[in-house]
Amino acid sequence: MAEYRITEHPILPAVPGEDITFTWEGQPLTARPGEMISSALFAHGVRTFGHHPKDGAPQGIFCANGQCAQCLVVADGKPVKACMTPVTPGMAVMPMDGLPDPPAIDETPALREIETVEVPVLILGGGPAGMSAAIQLAQRGVRCLLVDDKHRLGGKLVLQTHRFFGSINAVYAGTRGIDIATRLENEVRQHESVEIWLNSTALGVFSDGLVGILRTREGGEMGSGGDRENHAEREHPITPSPHHPKVEAYVLVKPQILLVATGAREKSLVFKGNTLPGVYGAGAFQTLVNRDLVKAASRLFIVGGGNVGLIAGYHALQAGIEVVGLVEALPECGGYKVHKDKLARFGVPIYTRHTVVSANGEDQVDSVTIAQLDDAWKVIPGTEKSFACDTVLIAVGLDPVNEFTAKAREYGIPVFDAGDAEEIAEASAAMFSGKIKGLEIAKALGVAEEEIPRDWVRTAAILKSHPGKTIEERIPEKESGIFPVFHCSQEIPCNPCTSVCPQQLIHIPEDDIRAIPEYLGVQLGKECLGCEKCVTICPGLAITLVDYRKDAENPLVTIAYEFLPESVHEGDVMTALDAVGEVLGEVTIASARAIKRNDRTVLVKVQAPKAIAKRIAGLRVQEPWVSAALEEEVTRMDDDEIVCRCERVTAGELRDLIRRGYRDLNEIKAVTRAGMGACGAKTCTNLILRLFREEGVPLAEVTPNVPRPLFVEAPLGVFAGVTEKEAHHD
């Protein structure tokens, strides 16, 4: 089988350790230590993990976060989620074709007492919000338990290789997400009062004030703040102890206060072919690419122009993946303009007022068809275009993971929420949200008396704000000396460039960091030193440095470049583009250097005619032919859109019931099984409600689903106290 490993990356180091061997359908394959089954299979080009028992439809990865069961495989005779199960040496993995067979048992295991743990504060979620809250509580001496279902802390930060926006002082703006995760984790672990349970999943919040946790203990597990290991020295954030025995146990935790910081889940979308292997979310894509260094696609098409989709496109290009295009239904992308512009500069076409019509292929995606939308959001016939690709990435928004909050409030349990579980925003906002909630909880426990500082509240509001107005790009008139040019023209919360300028020549008001930066060299009578710090730290790669000192007719332009240093050389001729991706002309590379203080950013200098020098914002990375449409449109005619992925229920079936007068989602569930699958109706509920709206039914007339008592599935044996070792023996 072909290898789809990323062996070189401009930001991430290689995955350490020697490969281990396992088998897929009897064929020997290799995996990296600690690698999930799904990533190991992707690394060998396997996209189809099984076939659905209802209609034999091919099944592949979908969420890569353990919340569905699309990636089920049979590992050593047991059905497991491929995205949450690490490969072990000699493991025999088979596709899940049809329904799994339950393991045979010889006798009923004896029931055991369930351990109950009492703690002042239980924090669900070890991402930016959860860690920030834990730090605030620990600083005030509050004992807390931090639970996360992954092998390390950080949440989605561990998937983010780009620099973050926001305030450099408040939320590490200008620092890469992967490095922010390490900083926060190291700080959390300095506190003895914070106990950490990794690889452990919250299953439910109950009326007696208890929270059920499926806890995993491993040999070598770094369980508490007392462990002083410096996580910043890890070469790569992959599971550190894959070969230690794993013991799962069901534990009940009784907190005085519950903090829910469980983040968000990605929304899905209904279109023909939407369940083909190769159609999945941006989170799954970034997990494969940025966590496990697996080349998850060869040719990618993105649906959704928010920050998630735009950033995923950039990450794909960095990983050497061709990005065929991006489609957005709105007239303009909802993400930051600098993200959109950056993608356009690198050669990715963006189709606004378009939608995806179908993902095409038999067993997996081989093309995608898009079409233009009219003012009524309907497809305009005759505007369809098809593009060859092997992956369709869905990035159409996020929903809060707030089930635990709702249950706690229903049962009268003191509960707070933070980060995306409270309100969808950027990770920088989640950090500050967690910080505020940590102090609020300390006050509720009576261990802190201070009020929430006003500047905290103001900063939190700014970090959560949506992009503001866009102005025309300001190109300075000056054509002498050396100075920065700002190619950002939209109001967003961001100020790293002001913080690093040694001359303090870059200005953004301190009371509102959403303003567009201004260069004050002329007003202050000072000259730029040409230190390049502002170019390097800009999260949007939207600052260049123009130097007229040696050649006024052909000045040097310094550009931030976050691709492999080996991909650009002195003397190369490359295409220069302006801020929005328009071609300015060909330029010659004068130098390209990557030094340690630039934090993996290559600084490329190009010699350019003065007529275009100040307008240059970037260099083309991907050639136009990559994004060319197929000569003929591909039409998928053989299926209806799938709404409930788990049970393979179509939009047509559901529309028929709605038109027949069904208004109760529980009745619809009984008739069609929509919502009965492994994801617990997390994916399909919003899609079914959308069908009601499209059919003209007010949602006030719709009776919602009765939520399941457990958030995710768990082996029945753990509730009886049976260990995994005993289960294998039985």
Image (spheres, rainbow, N blue to C red):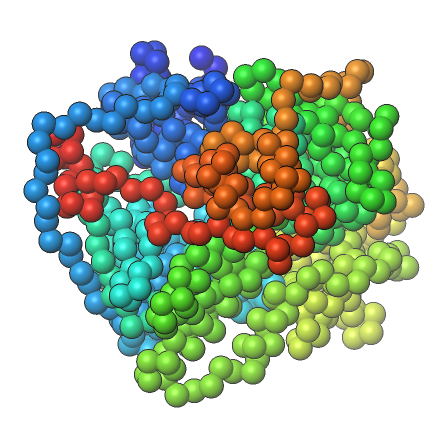
Choose top left, top right, bottom left or bottom right for residue 114. bottom left
The residue at the point 63 percent across, 39 percent down is 660
Q: Residue furthest bottom?
A: 449
Q: Is residue 61 above or below residue 603?
A: above
**How many labels were placed on the picture?**
0
The residue at the point 36 percent across, 71 percent down is 412
The residue at the point 77 percent across, 47 percent down is 330
The residue at the point 60 percent across, 32 percent down is 653
Residue 609 percent across, percent down from the top left: 88, 42
Q: Nearer the viewer, residue 553 or 137?
A: 137
Residue 369 percent across, percent down from the top left: 72, 26
Q: Is residue 72 above or below residue 199?
A: above
Residue 146 seen in the figure: no
Q: Nearer the viewer, residue 597 or 424?
A: 424
Q: Quadrant of the C terminus?
A: top left
Drawn side of residue 303 relative to residue 104, left or right: right
Q: Is residue 476 above or below residue 250?
A: below
Residue 433 seen in the figure: yes
Drawn side of residue 252 relative to residue 315, left or right: left
Residue 193 percent across, percent down from the top left: 26, 69
Drawn side of residue 415 relative to residue 571, left or right: left
Choose top left, top right, bottom left or bottom right for residue 207. bottom left
Q: Nearer the viewer, residue 350 or 392?
A: 392
Q: Quadrant of the N terminus?
A: top left
Residue 335 percent across, percent down from the top left: 69, 51
Choose top left, top right, bottom left or bottom right for residue 15. top left
